[in-house]
């Protein structure tokens, strides 16, 4: 198995290759405004680094957000188009799941500990979801709303929402907690997808469609304004 | 022979087309127009969501119609600008992925060059030089074309404010006619007198930019006339207003297009874009071109509006001319100036 994983839901366009057992290579290009420019070259780079050909890819996993819409679409249409051209399946992974998996893998949270992932949703809001259990799984969410409305219930919060909204999501009193992983790393998204494909762990694959969580901003026009007084 | 896959997502149409050696092999289109109707214009986020949903189905359908497989594609061309940024990004990302996965060259092209190139598919190669009038909901441009693939494109003039198609949408709203305004104004105008109201012919005085357009003032003139009539308690002669407004647009764009041909010693005029579908623009262009000894070329209507075939057509010209491929890193350029068929500019 050669799984190509990619994510553009957070500020980092990220790509990884996974052989079903372990991550072979991963890359992160940090510039949220340049996902469209960096993504395919990043795929090219991880294949080159591992000496694999594009035709060796057997499955694709893509982060379906939630995250800013334009970048999210770039990632998903890239994954879908690669999948069609290479004749392989494309699976969706909730991008917050990758952050949760990374928080556990890097020791930011403990095995079995319940915690919240919160990422920047712009417009003074965050995307959030609650995680816990062993094996780790998503308990509620994802949802979008103001940081102050996140029901953290005394839990640890990780993700880019933490430094943005320290009052609501920062470290609990008396604890030396950092914000954990801020942006998605495709290496962890690949691990989530590989486990789900093996039928192990608590993760579930999703259809490769964006989790927008918000409707398009569009207002129906009112009565036409007069041009004469 | 190289089969070129063309992808277009700059506004509200998701298009894919397959062209080889100047021949259209198959194409497909999905439009989100009906989803925008109640907002009176294209909503970028709605358009972009629709592009993502339609992208692969449209490519598949184009391949099916051409009886081709994706592995038959030898090059990918895509609109890299201008257009709605979030919409352009969908097609561009898809095109990059296809080009990379198939290991074929990518050509990031200028949307307007596609409008000009599309007539090759219907009426054969373009002459060595011609003038193109691009009139649509997003553009009103006069272009001087040489070899479309190789030469710089001379952007003779543009609109200073609204595009011609946008003026049709706004006037339709003033008259209570449905969106999109082009077809509804054209329909209403059939029973009207084009000489009933003398609306202004914008930018047609000797001191005005010879190839420049402006439709915002014309739209306001229509609104003023309508409000004055309504204020006086009279019935609104919708057909006459529609016909007189349409006449002002058709008169202005065809007059300037023919002048551009005569000024540059060019004997062929291309009229493309959605407004080329307007019956009066077409009739007046035919009349004036015939009088001036200019050959008029107008692609069939379904190729006049945004589509994937036109992008494949310009890609096909670039491939056959040996143009350098674009890098997989190219950015979308929502407000790309027109310098050549390749978004990066002329290359020879």
Image (cartoon, coloured by chain):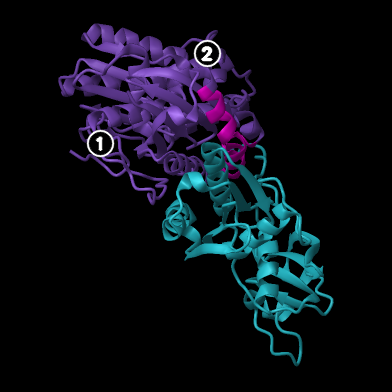
Chain colours: A cyan, B purple
Measured along the vertical axis of the image, is residue B331 above or below residue A84? Answer: below
Residue B103, given in percent of the width and then of the height, sits at: 40, 41
Q: Is residue B205 visible?
A: no
Q: Nearer the viewer, mark 2 or mark 1?
A: 1
Residue A210, given in percent of the width and then of the height, sits at: 66, 49
Q: Chain of mark 2?
A: B
Residue stretch rendered in magenta on the structure: B39-63
Q: On the picture, is A224 further left or further right than B189? A: right
Residue B247 occupies which quadrant of the picture?
Answer: top left
**Which residue in the structure is indicated by mark 2?**
B189
Q: Main secondary structure of the magenta part?
A: helix
Measured along the vertical axis of the image, is residue A160 above or below residue B177? Answer: below
Q: Chain of mark 1?
A: B
> What residue appears at the point 67 percent right and 50 percent down from the top-left corner?
A92
Residue A64, given in percent of the width and then of the height, sits at: 65, 52
Q: Secondary structure at mark 1?
A: loop
Tell whether position B342 is magenta: no
Earlier-in-chain disc, 2 versus 1: 2
């Amino acid at each position: 198995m050669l799984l190509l994983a990619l994510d553009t839901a957070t500020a980092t366009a990220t790509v990884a290759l996974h052989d079903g057992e372990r991550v072979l290579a991963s890359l992160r290009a940090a510039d949220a405004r340049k996902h469209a420019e960096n993504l395919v070259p990043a795929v090219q780079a991880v294949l080159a680094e591992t000496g694999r050909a594009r035709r060796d890819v057997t499955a694709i996993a893509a982060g379906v957000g939630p995250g800013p819409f334009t970048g999210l679409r770039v990632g998903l249409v890239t994954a879908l188009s690669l999948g069609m051209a290479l004749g392989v399946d494309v699976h969706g992974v909730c991008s917050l799941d990758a952050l949760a998996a990374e928080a556990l893998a890097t020791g930011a949270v403990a095995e079995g500990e319940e915690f919240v992932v919160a990422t920047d949703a712009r417009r003074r809001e965050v995307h959030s979801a609650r995680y816990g259990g062993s094996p780790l799984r998503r308990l509620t969410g994802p949802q979008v709303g103001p940081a102050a409305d996140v029901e953290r219930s005394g839990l640890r919060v990780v993700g880019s929402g933490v430094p943005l909204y320290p009052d609501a999501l920062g470290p609990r009193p008396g604890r030396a907690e950092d914000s954990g992983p801020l942006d998605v790393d495709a290496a962890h998204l690949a691990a989530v997808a590989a486990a789900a494909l093996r039928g192990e762990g608590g993760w579930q694959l999703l259809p490769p469609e964006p989790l927008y969580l918000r409707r398009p901003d569009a207002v129906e026009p009112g009565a036409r304004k007069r041009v004469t007084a | 022979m190289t089969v070129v896959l063309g992808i277009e997502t700059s506004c509200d149409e998701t298009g894919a087309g397959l062209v080889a050696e100047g021949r259209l092999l198959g194409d497909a289109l999905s439009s989100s127009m009906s989803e925008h109707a109640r907002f009176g214009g294209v909503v970028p986020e709605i358009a972009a969501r629709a592009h993502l949903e339609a992208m692969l189905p449209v490519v598949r359908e184009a391949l099916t119609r051409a009886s081709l497989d994706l592995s038959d594609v030898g090059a990918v061309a895509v609109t890299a600008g201008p257009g709605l940024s979030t919409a352009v990004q969908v097609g561009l990302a898809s095109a990059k992925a296809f080009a990379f996965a198939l290991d074929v060259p990518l050509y990031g092209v200028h949307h307007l060059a596609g409008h000009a190139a599309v007539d090759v598919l219907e009426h054969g190669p373009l002459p060595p030089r011609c003038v193109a009038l691009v009139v649509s909901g997003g553009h009103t441009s006069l272009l001087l074309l040489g070899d479309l693939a190789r030469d710089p494109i001379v952007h003779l003039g543009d609109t200073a404010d609204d595009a011609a198609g946008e003026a049709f949408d706004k006037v339709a709203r003033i008259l209570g006619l449905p969106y999109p305004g082009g077809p509804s104004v054209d329909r209403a105008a059939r029973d009207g007198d084009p000489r009933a109201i003398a609306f202004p012919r914008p930018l047609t005085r000797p001191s005005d930019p010879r190839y420049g357009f402006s439709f915002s003032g014309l739209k306001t003139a229509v609104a003023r006339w309508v409000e004055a009539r309504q204020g006086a308690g009279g019935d609104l002669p919708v057909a006459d207003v529609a016909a007189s407004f349409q006449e002002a647009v058709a008169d202005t764009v065809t007059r300037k297009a023919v002048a551009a041909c005569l000024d540059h010693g060019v004997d062929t005029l291309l009229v493309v874009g959605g407004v080329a579908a307007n019956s009066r623009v077409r009739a007046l262009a035919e009349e004036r071109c015939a009088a001036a000894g200019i050959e008029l070329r107008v692609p069939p209507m379904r190729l006049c509006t945004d589509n994937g075939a036109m992008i494949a057509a310009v890609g096909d010209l670039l491939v056959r001319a040996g143009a350098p491929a674009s890098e997989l890193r190219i950015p979308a350029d929502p407000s790309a100036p027109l310098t050549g068929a390749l978004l990066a500019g002329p290359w020879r």
